[in-house]
Amino acid sequence: MSGGPFVLAFDEIGLDDVARVGGKNASLGELLRTLAPTGVRVPGGFAITADGFRAHLDATGEADRVYAELDALDPSDTAALARTGASIRARIEAAPLPETVRAAALAAYRGLGDEVAVAVRSSATAEDLPTASFAGQHETYLNVRGEADLDLAVRRCMASLFTDRAIVYRTEQGFPHRQVALSVGVQRMVRSDLACAGTMFTLDTESGHRGVVLVDGAWGLGESVVKGRVDPDEFMVHKASLDAGFRAVFRRTLGTKARRLVLADAGAAREAVREEDVPPADRARFVLDDDEVLELARWAMRIEARYAELAGRDEMPMDVEWAKDGTTGALFVVQARPETVHARTGAAALETDRLEADAPVLLEGRAVGSRIGAGRVRIVHGTEDLADFREGEVLVAEMTDPDWEPVLRRAAAVVTDRGGRTCHAAIVSREMGLPCVVGTGTATSALAAGREVTVSCAGGSTGRVLDGRVPFRREVLDPSSLPEPRVPLMLNLADPGRAFALAQLPAAGVGLMRMEFVINHLIGVHPMALLHPERVTDPAVRAEVLRRAAGHRTPPDHFVDRLAEGVATIGAAFHPRPVIVRFSDFKTNEYAGLLGGADFEPVEANPMIGFRGASRYADDRYREAFALECAAIRRVRDEIGLRNVIVMIPFCRTLGEARAVLDEMARHGLVRGEHDMRVYVMCEIPNNVILADEFAELFDGFSIGSNDLTQLVLGVDRDSELLGATFDEQDPGVKRMISMVIERAHAGGRPVGICGEAPSNHPAFAEWLADEGIDSMSLSPDSLPTVARRLAAT
């Protein structure tokens, strides 16, 4: 393309050309030149260079005046900022392009086809650096068609270097205004208005965990996702499993996707799109199938590898925008830039906020980050409301806008009606370290202005708005500061929502993942009620069972899908470290408390030592439900590829029960020893100790459940308030039992860990266990640092 110094085709440029065409355009050129041959599809186009922008600014005669006005401006004076920015933009937009620039741009446009529709995007020369994203600072115009509209869109893009938000951002990031120029990218439109679009990140955006790809998507143009107009679908893909050839989508979250942006009639650049409702049937289905998600994830990983190679680094987390063309069904990458929040912080300290009291929950949504903040509610409907915003208030809005960033920096927290974890509000809140809850649905109507609230993102993936100012504390831990203990320390972990953050701790893996948390909190229905809803006697309960299972192929799939996602999330977070997953160990009274459970559970006088654990799995009263648990584990290991997941049998009373359970597992494709399938047994019954030699022949390892073992050695109900003082894991009899099983298991070549609460609660007991030769200890996350230091010191 002979565009002189003012126009370059995308396939003529690469990342070395940021000074000429800005970060966004340089990235598009790099993708097109180096990754298109590997199958990554990128729409073609061209860039009007930074020299073209400078030529336009010089031709207006305004350059010196513009920069003098900016140098004299106090960006914190919002009124002066608005006046100055508007005046500069109007002058630049109104001036005609220099003929040399205009002629080169129109010639390149004609080369794309006969008045083809294009996207016209701004690309600043200081943009998309690993330390500064400039995301949303400058304008983009979609569905631009024809030479006159292209000319207008180019001038408007150039003028957008001086939006209020861009002026403030440059000032705060330390970029001199004169040193930042703007290139304009002109790219063939992908007709995602007829399909879907979204973003993807090559890490977990909340924790910075590098082992996954996060894909977001919604119907229509991608602006809906980027700017937080919708609650999008969300998919998580495990990188290592995908590399190994597995179908590694391990989590899917269906968004509401109530509205979409579509192309309007071509005309003035600002009127090129319109918003419309999404039909209910489309809201209820995912925008992508698994094959498409996996294709996008592979592309994201190739892009990350290329950028890391160019930067001379082992990894380079990326923020990528994708679109699907509704006319051809083809997927495209339309932008790629380095991710900025975690790239900037690197291996930062693990900050943990903790609520110190309970309070009523007013709203829930998706948590962004893990912080807590409190303040008075300020409802913001538009820019006109920002003047009243006060430092330390909680900004509540339908969605945020890039123009609001100067005010967002003064907020204690952010809450929105709409948006997902990669929308504008989420991205900016992460950069600013603000607690943010997105996609609540009703925040602007449910929260009264002036009401004091606490916004908590410290409870995993669900963010909550609590009534009043709730006291909290912040703990800071540098994981690298912990010494290496003489015994591997693992974690007791049940909540998948905390997995990626806690995986930063220097733990040897997860020594106990309780299925019960996922069943209780993420499924909420008794598995037999899902298998046999016709046996649920209460019509209202039966209807609720079926309602919760809606959206899955069959009601039992609700159980398998959600359980597999919960287990896989923890497995992916800690991969390749082992994750020991205990099959369900509810007591009958607890199972009866699940939706529909009362029709399937017996009433026992003492459920603690009743129909629980291994005794259920091969029994006709639960056998079908155990098959669902096995199906979930098989999906995690054999389809998603998380072979680091180990299963464990709880409350296994006899050798006969052990053999029956192993046979039942094998019937459902979980064969011990096949595909590195390891099966552990809980050691929590005296018979497990007495017959440890025989149990060692059937299982690959032991995990001591000190709570139940203490209960059965001492004959004390662990829940008894009257006998609380007698219940002591450090009783000599209990310790003798633990010593015996360690000795006998080791004689049989089997490792022994402990996952009860005793070493978490009593560091001295942890020292004794280490002296006895325990192979691992599984602790509560809070206690791991203390025990690590204690064991290292001794």
Image (cartoon, grey):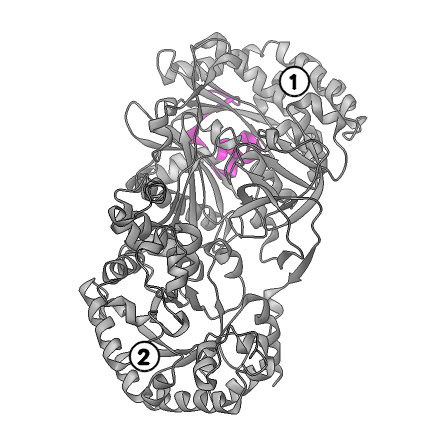
The image position of residue 433, as x and y in percent, is 65, 46
Q: Which quarter of the figure has residue 787?
A: bottom right
Membership of 8 in magenta stretch: yes
Residue at 50% over, 32% down: 226
Say which of 288 and 416 sits in front. Answer: 416
Q: From the viewer's perspective, is residue 350 above or below residue 201?
A: below
The secondary element bearing badge 1 is classed as helix
How far is the residue under mark 2 from the one under mark 1? 82 Å
Q: Which residue is mark 2?
A: 653
Say which of 96 and 500 sits in front. Answer: 500
Q: Which quarter of the figure has residue 427?
A: top right
Q: Say whether residue 712 is visible.
A: yes
Say which of 114 and 398 sits in front. Answer: 398
Q: From the viewer's perspective, is residue 665 above or below residue 524?
A: below
The image position of residue 743, as x and y in percent, is 40, 91
The image position of residue 118, as x and y in percent, is 43, 19
Which mark is drawn over residue 528?
none
The image position of residue 398, as x and y in percent, is 58, 29
Q: Which residue is mark 1?
A: 57
Residue at 20% over, 62% down: 668
Membership of 527 in magenta stretch: no
Q: Disc 2 vs disc 1: which is toward the camera? A: 2
Residue at 47% over, 71% down: 508
The secondary element bearing badge 2 is classed as loop
Q: Which residues are magenta?
A: 1-26
Near mark 2 (Cα within 10 A), the count class, few <14, some 14-19 or many ≥20, is some
Number of numbered tags placed on the structure image: 2
Which amino acid, by three-letter code, is at mark 1? Leu
